[in-house]
Amino acid sequence: MTQSILAVDLGGTSILLGEVTLDGKVLHTQSYPTNTATQAAAMENIQKAISDYLGTAPRIARELIAIGIGVVGRVDRAQGVWMEIQPGKTNPTDVRSIIEQQFGLPCGIDNDVSCATLAELKHGWGRESKDFIYLNVGTGIAAGFVVNGAIIEGSHFNAGEIGHMVVDMNSDAICACGRRGCVERLSSGLGLHERVINLRSQYPDTAIAIEEGKRVAAETIFEQAQAGDALAERVTEEGARALAAAIMNMVRVSDPDTIVLGGGVGGNAYFKELVGQYLNPKTMRFVANGIAGTKQETPEAGLVGAAMVGLEAWTMKQGSVVS
């Protein structure tokens, strides 16, 4: 093995770094803490994590040829610019130039869910389907739309931000975007936590423990729901119904044959089954493969996709274009 790429996947709670081969095999990973309160803080964490990884992690391939980065928010992949970490917090940052100058390697950057979708297109369902949706349900919610074999980016690199799709206009869950009933406020890891906090006073006998400064994990909520806790049941069922509504709305938009459900929340078997119960058969009749898991060999889809973006940057430096 002669060449590899350093891939970086910025998540809502941690930064995952790893060495990835040119054909998408993850050789080694290491996790670092992160701070995504601001784009500047997140960028500083990324730089520190890369520096530490390069200085301490074992190198498996003989040559590291590029760095690929997946981040939350809007990204101009062609220019290597991170436009914003959250809606309304625009802060264009030339990540490509910053990283290339600091570490001396070609750098590519894209949105984290776009990276995961790219990996699924190349190494997973994309081998069988030209029209699928990669839906990531984790700390937040976003999707990658693959139509006729291509990922839709949008005119402002904002396609797929379906977390702000309204699924309940009468909801009491108010989103930071200013609207009521966005699916992210009801079905994401953070949204489920917020619902527990906001509704807890109505359920004094709940078994869900709340620690100051700590998030209630989605897995904990699901476990309590299965045990019959009324608060957990309400939050879980609301979340499942909301996510099912979002899925059916997306199906009506792009006519996919597959919905690939990923992320820490979306990958939970109990929650996934509950979501399926709220899907309308008539709406889903042409989604031939239904709600499916990834077909990739590795669970680190975001890392593999980030590596592909890094490979693209390296190839461009060589004077050619990745096919």
Image (spheres, helix red, strand yellow):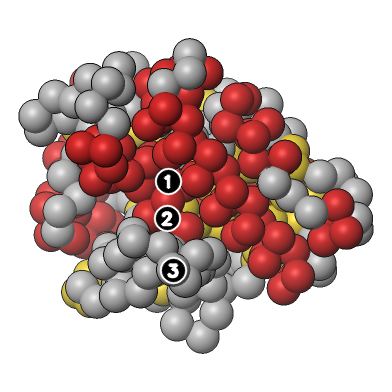
* Left or right: residue 207 compared with residue 119: left
How packed is label 3: few (under 14 Cα within 10 Å), some, or many (20 or more)? few
Q: Secondary structure at mark 2?
A: helix
Callout 1 environment at 10 Å: few (<14), some (14 to 19), or many (20+)? many
Q: Which residue is mark 3?
A: 170
Label 2 close to label 1 by CB (< 8 Å):
yes
Q: Amino acid at mark 1?
A: Ser
The amino acid type of the residue labelled 3 equals: Asn
* Alpha-carbon span between mark 3 and mark 2: 15 Å
Q: Amino acid at mark 2?
A: Glu
What residue is at 42 percent from the left and 27 percent from the top? 230
Number of labels in the image equals 3
> Which of 232/246 is in front?
232
Examine the rendered structure and indicate whether residue 41 appears above or below residue 292: below
CA neighbours of label 2 inside 10 A, class few (<14), some (14 to 19), many (20+): many
Percent x, y of residue 295:
74, 34
Q: Is residue 3 visible?
A: no
Give the mark, 3 or 2, whose residue is nearer the N terminus. 3
Residue 9, position as x, y percentages in the image: 38, 42
The first of marks 1 and 3 along the sequence is 3
Quadrant of res 23: top right
Viewer-side label of 3, 2: 3
Q: Residue at point 22% right, 20% down?
A: 209
Q: Which mark is residue 188?
A: 1
Q: Nearer the viewer, mark 1 or mark 3?
A: 3
Q: Which residue is mark 2?
A: 184
